[in-house]
Image (cartoon, helix red, strand yellow):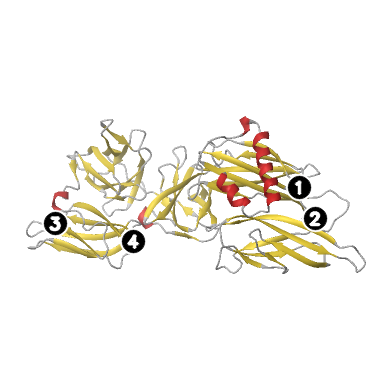
């Protein structure tokens, strides 16, 4: 909170700053202890204003009620009762450890009609969030007084988010003078000025107008204050509908990943809790995202539709990137239905792990991971989800050739080839391991990627203009080489390496963007991944 006060007080005149500081301290001491979520590294600063709907005048000493939105985040609980000051403002500060949450702000007008608004916060980008829930309420008659009033637009020309245009909407045609105080030491006498702020912060903007109805009337002086939040980042929301067939899904989750320095980072999870199959992510910065939708085990459609990415793609490296620069609710997803395999006598089962924990001396099971059964052309047939022990199974399968694919977002999966035959209709020792960047597998303890001894590590790493890998290919053998970005984009078309006197792979990286890349080398049914970083 100290940083907030420093930013705010530096931009206010001394008397007003002390008054606001006093209000904040009074609020903190008057709220019952049980109503405050004390402690926590993250801070939510709530600054709201209530004005008269008719003329924009601030409504003072008006009750406001703050409640946490437990439907958005059931782990966040908070409540507080506040009153507006002489300028119609109410203030609150909330300390919390939760990463995201929602607040329902409510109040009543003079006719006892209820009004509310929900605001959302998240701390992926900062440990401080500023929220501005404002209300315009019906006013009790009889008379309408002259009142200064204004509104503003951020980035009016679309080229500078630190620029604002202010519009005088005072309820009089007899304004003879006006003064704008932008809160940063600058003023203007224009009717609708444009002002650029040179530093981020919360600024107290005041419009003072002088109104004279006739030449003989005494001038009327009236003012209004509004707070302007100047930030270097814009925040947006992203949403859409998810359907299973012709109908919205009943129980499921949407996952939001941000592409950050070529890494996929899970930012948020949205649970569908209505009948419309709608998801929404709040408070997102401009950037590139991937959205995934999946069903929950209690859905009537569970394992009948596979995990699906926007827009309607089955695998994460095929997903369309959402380039978020504005609010958007058009990112709909139609879950991909799965074909049913004709019944047979075959069966496949196994376990998926996150790796070996040397401290506990055991593997860590991966729960609720989608495991796909692919046909010989790598098309999905049916799916299963791993249970709490990481176990999965497929039963009543035709005797045929299959591939097992674990769909883990952001990690390259090498499908495990299995063949069910009359002599071997049951395979129950499939083991999949989720590594830092890949998912590899083995059947009956035979590793599917056992060529690592033949391929060295990339160097220099990080690379600038070129990267090398030493390899040892037996005479007459070949390697197929493919280079991907971590987002799944194919960077270098597949090509073949053959044995030679000087077995060294050289890649030109001079035109690659900075980020993480993978080199996949394939020899027959075996493969290996090597990772390097480009500066």
Q: CA gap, disc 2 to disc 3?
A: 78 Å
Task: Indicate which label's residue lies in the foreground, 2 or 4.
Answer: 4
Q: Which quarter of the rendering shows the C terminus?
A: bottom left
Q: CA gap, disc 4 to disc 1?
A: 54 Å
For marks 2 and 4 on the same chain, the one whose residue lies earlier in the sequence: 2
Q: Residue at position x 41%, y 48% from top?
A: 307
Task: Indicate which label's residue lies in the foreground, 1 or 2.
Answer: 1
Q: Residue at position x 26%, y 47% from top?
A: 402
**Left or right position of 506 against 341:** left
For marks 3 and 1 on the same chain, the one whose residue lies earlier in the sequence: 1
Whether residue 14 appears in this view of the structure is: yes
Crowd rating for badge 4 (residues with CA inside 10 Å; few <14, some 14–19, many 20+): some
Identify the residue position indicated by label 3 in the image.
471
Counting from the top left corner in percent of width and height, residue 301 is at: 45, 43
Task: Indicate which label's residue lies in the foreground, 4 or 1.
Answer: 1
Element carrying mark 2: loop
Residue located farthest toward the right when viewing the structure as drawn: 216
Q: Looking at the rendered structure, which numbered label has been put on residue 54?
A: 2
Q: Out of 275 and 319, give the one closest to the viewer.
A: 319
Counting from the top left corner in percent of width and height, residue 488 is at: 34, 57
Element carrying mark 4: loop
Q: CA gap, disc 2 to disc 4?
A: 55 Å
Whether residue 274 appears in this view of the structure is: no
Element carrying mark 1: loop
Identify the residue position indicated by label 4 in the image.
514
Identify the residue position indicated by label 1 in the image.
86
For marks 3 and 4 on the same chain, the one whose residue lies earlier in the sequence: 3
Task: Indicate which label's residue lies in the foreground, 3 or 1.
Answer: 1
Q: Out of 97 and 242, give the one closest to the viewer.
A: 97
């Amino acid at each position: 909170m100290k940083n907030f006060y420093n930013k705010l007080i530096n931009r206010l005149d001394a008397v007003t700053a002390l008054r606001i500081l006093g209000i904040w301290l009074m609020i903190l001491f008057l709220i019952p202890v049980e109503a405050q979520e004390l402690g926590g590294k993250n801070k939510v600063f709530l600054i709201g204003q209530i004005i008269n709907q008719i003329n924009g005048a601030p409504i003072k000493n008006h009750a406001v009620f703050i409640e946490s939105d437990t439907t958005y985040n059931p782990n966040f609980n908070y409540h507080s009762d506040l009153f507006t000051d002489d300028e119609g403002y109410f203030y609150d500060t909330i300390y919390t450890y939760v990463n995201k949450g929602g607040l329902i702000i409510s109040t009543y007008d003079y006719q006892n009609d209820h009004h509310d608004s929900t605001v959302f916060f998240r701390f992926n980008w900062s440990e401080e969030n500023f929220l501005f829930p404002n209300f315009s309420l019906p006013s009790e008659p009889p008379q309408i007084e002259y009142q200064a009033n204004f509104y503003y637009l951020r980035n009016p020309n679309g080229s500078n988010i630190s620029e604002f245009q202010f519009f005088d909407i005072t309820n009089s045609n007899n304004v003879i003078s006006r003064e704008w105080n932008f809160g940063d030491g600058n003023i203007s006498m224009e009717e609708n000025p444009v002002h650029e702020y040179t530093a981020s912060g919360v600024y107290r903007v005041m419009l003072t107008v002088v109104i004279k109805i006739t030449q003989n009337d005494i001038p009327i002086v009236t003012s209004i204050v509004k707070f302007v939040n100047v930030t270097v980042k814009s925040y947006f929301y992203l949403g859409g509908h998810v359907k299973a067939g012709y109908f919205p899904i009943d129980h499921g989750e949407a996952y939001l990943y941000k592409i950050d320095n070529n890494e996929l980072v899970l930012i948020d999870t949205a649970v569908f809790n209505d009948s419309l199959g709608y998801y929404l992510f709040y408070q997102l910065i401009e950037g590139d995202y991937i959205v995934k939708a999946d069903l929950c085990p209690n859905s009537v459609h569970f394992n009948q539709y596979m995990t699906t990415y926007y827009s309607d793609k089955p695998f994460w490296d095929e997903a369309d990137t959402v380039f978020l620069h504005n609010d958007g609710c058009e990112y709909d997803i139609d879950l991909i239905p799965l074909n049913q395999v004709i019944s047979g006598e075959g069966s496949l089962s196994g376990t998926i792990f996150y790796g070996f924990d040397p401290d506990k001396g055991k593997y860590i099971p991966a729960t609720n991971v989608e495991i796909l059964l692919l046909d010989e052309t790598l098309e999905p047939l049916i799916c299963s989800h791993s249970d709490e022990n990481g176990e999965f199974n497929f039963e009543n399968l035709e005797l045929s050739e299959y591939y097992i694919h674990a769909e883990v977002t952001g990690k390259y999966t090498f499908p495990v080839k299995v063949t069910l035959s009359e002599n071997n209709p049951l395979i129950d020792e499939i083991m999949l391991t989720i590594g830092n960047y890949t998912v590899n597998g083995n059947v009956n303890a035979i590793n599917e990627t056992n060529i690592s001894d033949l391929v060295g590590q990339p160097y220099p790493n990080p690379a600038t203009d070129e990267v090398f890998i030493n390899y040892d290919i037996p005479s007459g053998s070949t390697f197929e080489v493919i280079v991907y970005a971590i987002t799944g984009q194919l960077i270098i078309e597949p090509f073949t390496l053959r044995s030679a006197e000087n077995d060294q792979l050289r890649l030109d990286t001079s035109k690659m963007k900075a980020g993480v890349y993978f080199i996949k080398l394939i020899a027959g049914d075996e493969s290996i991944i090597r990772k390097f970083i480009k500066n």
